[in-house]
Image (spheres, rainbow, N blue to C red):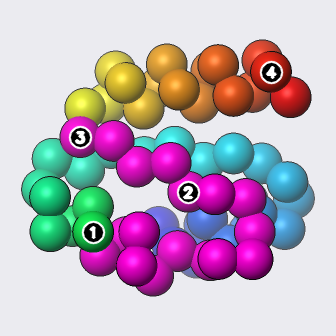
Amino acid sequence: MLRSHRLCSRLGLVMSVAAHSAPVRRLLEANADPDGTRLVIHARADTAIATATALTAAA
């Protein structure tokens, strides 16, 4: 997943993911590519999809 985020960052694409586990969300945030597009992490899939849709529409 983090490799996919790095590839998306290089292309300027927003990546929004869902993880139910708080420790997994913290691990993803800690290891995300800091130089690229921000990785958006949510606890619920519907929120992740809505956020990605909104960010894509705004771009």
Specify few, some or many for label 1: CA neighbours under 10 Å numbering under 14, 14-19, or 20 or more: few
**Going 64% across and 77% down the picture, which residue do you hit?**
34
Q: Assign a secondary structure to mark 4.
A: helix
Q: From mark 4 to mark 1, how far is it between C-alphas?
A: 26 Å
Q: From mark 1 to mark 3, how far is it between C-alphas?
A: 11 Å
Residue 45: quarter of image: top left
47 and 2: which one is in front?
A: 47
Indicate whether 25 appears above or below 34.
above
**Going 73% across and 59% down the picture, which residue do you hit?**
37
Task: State the quadrant of the C terminus.
Answer: top right
Task: Determine which of the numbered discs, if any, sits on residue 54 in the image.
Answer: none
Sequence-wise, which precedes: disc 2 or disc 4? 2
Label 3 close to label 4 by CB (< 8 Å): no
Q: From mark 2 to mark 1, how far is it between C-alphas?
A: 12 Å
Q: Dot 3 corresponds to which residue?
A: 43
Q: Dot 2 corresponds to which residue?
A: 39
What residue range appears in magenta?
A: 27-43
Q: Dot 4 corresponds to which residue?
A: 58
Q: Amino acid at mark 2?
A: Leu
Q: Dot 1 corresponds to which residue?
A: 26
Q: Amino acid at mark 1?
A: Arg
Sequence-wise, which precedes: disc 1 or disc 3? 1
Indicate whether 8 appears above or below 26.
above
